[in-house]
Image (cartoon, rainbow, N blue to C red):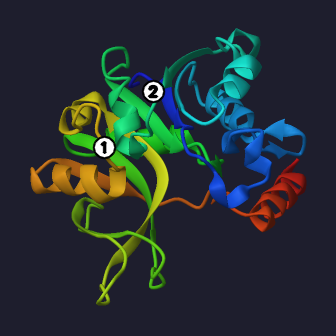
């Protein structure tokens, strides 16, 4: 049986401006959901799928996260932090972990709650031919507000279309914020540069002929950038607990 993926990056450097005044005193990943920080929900859920080591980038109010989680031992995990003096974007934030991270790892955005079955996702990843990465995707015909990707029959990325869109695509998949990445992909990210996963890193990887795949699933995940979405996520958590 293939080794499990035991490391995850949770990107937590954003300012959370759309959730002010909540984010005046706490970073967005620390917003409580049923009394527990969103970041804790994600760490505990990853742990259920065998993840024991976390890499967290920080910028806005970093001490709030570090004081709460420490080195992770209270939660039965190990946490490494990287502070960004200047925000480096979703891909730029990954680059700082290159010297210490292992060969395969999950990545999620810290402003979302994800209940994806990571074990099943990793099993799908193992079945792909020479993958450099995989991203959760969702077939859609409604994508005015999203970057989308066209996939082939094996779910391999063919072409990425960033918003705003000027045409319709016959096989458009919304790009969601859950990934498995191989360390090799970090070599595409420039040092100390603002760089985004969807708009810059993945188009470059696809153009280089690397095999990057989509992954469809039905599990719940939700990006949280409004009070209404906080309430929606809390109601969902109440319904399953």
Left/right placement of residue 209 relative to residue 29 reads: left
Q: Is residue 100 above or below residue 216?
A: above
Other-residue count near label 2 (Cα within 10 Å), few / some / many at <14 / 14–19 / ≥20: many
Residue 174 badge: none
On the image, the x and y values in percent for residue 38 come to: 73, 41
Under circle 2, the secondary element is loop
Which residue occupies 29% across, 32% down? 192
User: In the rendered view, does 122 fall on the left or right side of 47?
Assistant: left
Extreme-bottom residue of the structure: 167
In this view, the residue in front, 124 or 15, is: 15
**Residue drawn at the location 52% of the way across and 43% of the way down:** 108
Instruction: Select label 2 or label 1 by which is in front.
Output: 1
Instruction: Determine which residue is flagged by label 2.
Output: 5
Give the position of the N terminus as an image quadrant.
top left
Disc 1 crowd, CA 10 A, few/some/many (<14, 14-19, 20+): many
In the displayed structure, 20 sits above or below 126; it is: below
Q: Earlier in the sequence, mark 2 or mark 1?
A: 2
The residue that appears at 72% across and 57% down in the rendered structure is 19
Q: Residue at x 19, y 32 (%)?
A: 187
Horizontal and vertical percent for residue 161? 28, 72
In this view, the residue in front, 28 or 155, is: 28
Label 1 sits on residue:
133
Q: Is residue 220 visible?
A: no
For residue 233, what is the image quadrant? Answer: bottom right
**Residue 150 visible in this rendered orientation of the protein:** yes
**Secondary structure at numbered mark 1:** strand
């Amino acid at each position: 049986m293939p080794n499990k993926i035991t490391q995850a990056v949770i990107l937590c450097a954003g300012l959370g401006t759309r959730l002010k005044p909540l984010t005046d005193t706490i970073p967005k990943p620390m917003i409580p959901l049923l009394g527990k920080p969103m970041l804790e929900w994600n760490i505990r859920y990853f742990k259920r799928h065998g993840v024991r080591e976390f890499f967290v980038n920080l910028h806005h109010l970093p001490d709030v996260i570090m004081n709460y989680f420490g080195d992770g031992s209270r939660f039965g995990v190990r946490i490494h932090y990287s502070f960004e003096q200047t925000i480096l974007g979703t891909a730029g934030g990954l680059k700082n972990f290159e010297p210490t991270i292992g060969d395969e790892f999950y990545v999620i955005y810290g402003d979302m709650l994800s209940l994806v079955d990571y074990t099943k996702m990793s099993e799908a990843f193992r079945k792909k031919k020479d993958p450099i990465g995989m991203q959760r995707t969702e077939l859609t015909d409604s994508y005015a507000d999203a970057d989308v990707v066209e996939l082939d029959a094996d779910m391999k990325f063919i072409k990425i279309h960033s918003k705003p869109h000027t045409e319709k695509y016959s096989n458009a998949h919304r790009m969601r914020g859950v990934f498995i990445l191989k360390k090799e992909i970090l070599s595409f990210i420039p040092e100390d540069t603002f760089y985004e996963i969807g708009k810059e890193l993945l188009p470059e990887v696809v153009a280089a002929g690397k095999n990057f795949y989509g992954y469809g699933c039905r599990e719940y995940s939700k990006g949280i950038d409004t009070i209404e979405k906080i309430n929606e996520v809390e109601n969902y958590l109440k319904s399953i607990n």
